[in-house]
Image: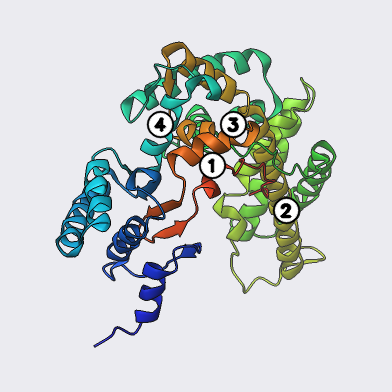
Amino acid sequence: MSLPDQDARDRIREDLDATLVVEAAAGTGKTSELVRRIIALVEQRKARLSEIVAVTFTDRAGGEMKLRLRMAIEESRESAGGRGRAVLDQALEDLETARIGTIHSFCADLLREHPVEAGIDPLFEVAAGQDARRLFVEAFEEWFGAVLAQSPEGVRRILRRRFSRRDPSPREILRRAGAAVLERRDFDAPWRLEELERDREIDALVGELGTLGALHAGARAPDDWLAKSIGRVRELVAGIEHRESVAPRDYDGLEAELAAVAQERFWGWKGRPGLREFSDGIARADVLARRDRVKALLDQLNRRAEANLAAALDRDLRSLVPIYDAVKAREGKLDFLDLLIAPAIWCATTARCGSSCSGASRTSWSTSFRTPILCRPRSFCCSRPRARTRPTP
């Protein structure tokens, strides 16, 4: 009895000159079909096993695939004869050195074979786990000390932000953001920096807050929660005016303060609905509408300032990349992303790459992840990392 997807399985085994993408759920036999495809390539002399690359999701999966290939080769040898058996005998010899493993191990092998062409230390070591984190911490500390002296815009603004005790510190936020930038450093296009007339918009908003806060003086019921809400606005403006009586307006500080004020609960206080008038000549509903309008302006400014800050911070954090690269170079280390970037850049920038990579995997680039992808070898080697413009969060 044939399976519902038998036609697709047959094509995987028989259409050996095509590039295929296979998607299927776990346990449906993707790896088994990949093994059969590799055996078919060998049996039909389209490639030796030493010319095939099988990339797996984990090292353990690579070991399991080698075991499956050994069993499949042994099984095919029993029924093969003459030239066919000799081909499979050679496949058994090639199996131990076959390129079956993770993408990182394959790239590391390429780099060790061609370190000069790739421009790396021939004796490089792979930094993983705690070692990679140690290198990052060393690079971050060096970068952080430098930016504190230079005070670029994004760093300066984030360090002024106010956070609760439950939130990470600004330094920790920078550390996490720096780690994120390093993880995607191969996409080096700058974030879209939306124009923001921050100082002018802050001036206008402080004026709106002052007008709203002034309503508290005439409140008929000062103990009403709506009146208390307006009173909090008045206190905010009074604090700003007091600071500015002795020093110029601090826009970085105000940006941080307004971001924190927007999270306060008093913006939702409504008070007693039975009170129709807030003060002489001013209806309660009008005060609520004014407060909601000012809150909307505050939220709008904060959203735009956050987007502008994110792009500025990404720009500032880019200077961490060369420092991190220098720290790794001093110790002769490459991290996992380096293992992917270096071969791709080398292959995309030198005419010699084609022959070198073809020698490593002439006929078939086979991959087995949670979803196997079967394709030709040059699809990886000759694809240069491209810069992409990322949208602002």
Disc 3 from disc 2: Cα separation: 54 Å
* Closer to the camera in the image, 358 or 347: 358
- The answer to whether any part of residue 288 appears in the image is yes
Percent coordinates x, y for residue 112 in the rendering: 41, 25
Which label is found at residue 300? 2
- The tag earlier along the polypeptide, 4 or 1, is 4
Which label is found at residue 352? 3
- The tag earlier along the polypeptide, 2 or 4, is 4
- The tag earlier along the polypeptide, 3 or 1, is 3
- The answer to whether any part of residue 162 appears in the image is no
SS for callout 4: helix
Q: Nearer the viewer, mark 3 or mark 1?
A: 3
- Crowd tier of the residue under label 2, counting other residues whose Cα lies within 10 Å: few below 14, some 14–19, many 20 or above: few
Disc 4 from disc 3: Cα separation: 18 Å
Q: Residue at x 57, y 34 (%)?
A: 353
- The tag earlier along the polypeptide, 4 or 3, is 4
Amino acid type of the residue tagged 4 in the rendering? Ala
| Depicted 331 relative to depicted 83: above or below | above
Mark 2 vs 4: CB contact within 8 A: no
Q: Nearer the viewer, mark 4 or mark 3?
A: 3
| Depicted 307 relative to depicted 2: above or below | above
* Closer to the camera in the image, 286 or 341: 341
Disc 3 from disc 1: Cα separation: 12 Å
- Crowd tier of the residue under label 4, counting other residues whose Cα lies within 10 Å: few below 14, some 14–19, many 20 or above: many
* Closer to the camera in the image, 336 or 102: 102
| Depicted 138 relative to depicted 259: above or below | above
* Closer to the camera in the image, 200 or 226: 200
- Crowd tier of the residue under label 3, counting other residues whose Cα lies within 10 Å: few below 14, some 14–19, many 20 or above: few
- Residue bearing the label numbered 4: 108
Q: Residue at x 39, y 44 (%)?
A: 51
Which label is found at residue 266? none
* Image quarter of the N terminus: bottom left
